Image (tube, rainbow, N blue to C red):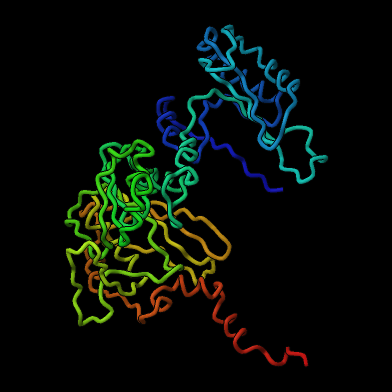
Amino acid sequence: MFHISPFCLVELPSDDAARAVVERSILAHSIYEHWGTADTIDELHAAVKRDTAQLWPDYLETSFKISIDSYRGSRSQKQKVALINSFSYLGFEGPILLSSPDNEFTLFEEWALQPVPEKKQPSPLKVHFGRLIAHSVRDLINKFDLKKRDYISTTSMDSELALVTANIALAGPGKLFFDPFVGTGSFPIACAQFGALVWGSDIDGRSMRGTGGKKSLLGNFQQYGLEQSLGGVFVSDLTNTPMRKARVLDGILCDPPYGVREGLKVLGCRDPEKDLIGSRDPAFIPPKKPYSFTAMLDDILNFATEMLVDNGRLSFWMPTANDEDQEIAVPTHPCLEVVVVCTQVFNKWSRRLITYRRLPDSDVDVSALALRKTQQDQANGRSADDLNPFRRHYFRGFKSEQELSDIVTPDVSQLKV
């Protein structure tokens, strides 16, 4: 049976470095100083005695406790006590404190996953022992849980994914972050939690204004005591932003619309001969026209190259079909380097979290940039499906052209009368 281990061995220069890493981590649980790994408890004891005896004097007089963590397994209280006592050779003389000791040591066990409990293996596959350095901030997932948030919409990003995105984009104190599809503010809230000053815009002002009071984007920031980190939000779409073009942003995070619930829209008139006219009337609703999905991806990349500082990061979510023939390629830009692509797989489609780094101008391929500027969006058509290949495949059930053809024109030789 294929076994997936929940443990990862990493090399770091010091406890402080390890603490700095895990205290920003959402996906990790905690980090330990590694004292030994073996297939059996006896082999583990031998490894700990052989490799860590020089460390023991540092903990002789401090308070401590030893815990048992059995992954996919369980131990009776009597067994746990016996395992803990088997480490008596460490010689720790300080008081044993079950709550807030100076040092906590843990024996980790990896058990095989057995579908039938009666066939449980008599012993774990692996055992590990280590000293706790620090826990992660994974509890932030619960703090920002959408079920507890005062104001959300159908497209509000899950708290864990928003925090992970903010981490990958390197949100932190003294940095400016922006979300051009801000909605109810999931990404800016995550970035603000890590100390960034955040801004946002959205083509639909209702999503930001909410219903007033706590039921608004500002109310969400107030709920978490982060209102001082909100620079401001405004109504705009990406192609008609009032923002001055200047490379001042440290990060851009967004989950752009996929155009499934309704076709993508952008401010403008369907008739190319008509001009987009504004109004000072608060009740004025500007006209919108269909928007190409691929053009939107290009516009996001272009916006990032104009607004990000050197080495600033763009992180956004993009859907794609799982079928290679229908897959949407990761968009590229000469001014942006792909840092990492994370994939969340669903049934017949997935969504990717794509993160880019803004290259310094000296590192940009000038010829490739000039070629890109001469290319125009080749999307044809006026309907939502014409302009959005993902939407088209989505409502076709991600069936291939051959499968669709077979449905429309079945093989009559296989029909029975």
Q: Position of residue 321 (x, y in %)?
A: 51, 67
Residue 335: x %, y % from top left: 27, 58
Q: From the viewer's perspective, is 341 left or right of 244?
A: right
Q: Residue at x 48, y 27 (%)?
A: 134
> In this rendering, would 191 be left or right of 408?
left
Query: Dividing the picture into quarters, in which one does residue 38 lie?
Result: top right
Q: Nearer the viewer, residue 50 or 401?
A: 401
Going by the image, does 98 lie left or right of 172?
A: right
Q: Residue at x 54, y 69 (%)?
A: 323
79 is higher (above) or lower (below) than 327: above
Q: How many marks?
A: 0
Work out whether 63 lies above or below 127: above
Q: Where does the image place residue 262, in percent across and percent down from the top left?
A: 42, 70
Look at the picture and state if 175 lies above or below 357: above
Farthest residue, direction right:
118
Q: Nearer the viewer, residue 108 or 136?
A: 136
Q: Picture coordinates of residue 190 (x, y %)? A: 38, 43
| Front in this rendered view, residue 272 or 304 | 272
Displayed quadrant of residue 380: bottom left
Seen at 38% across and 48% down, the residue is 215
Residue for point 27% across, 68% down: 285
Q: Is there any visible trace of residue 356 in the rendered image?
A: no
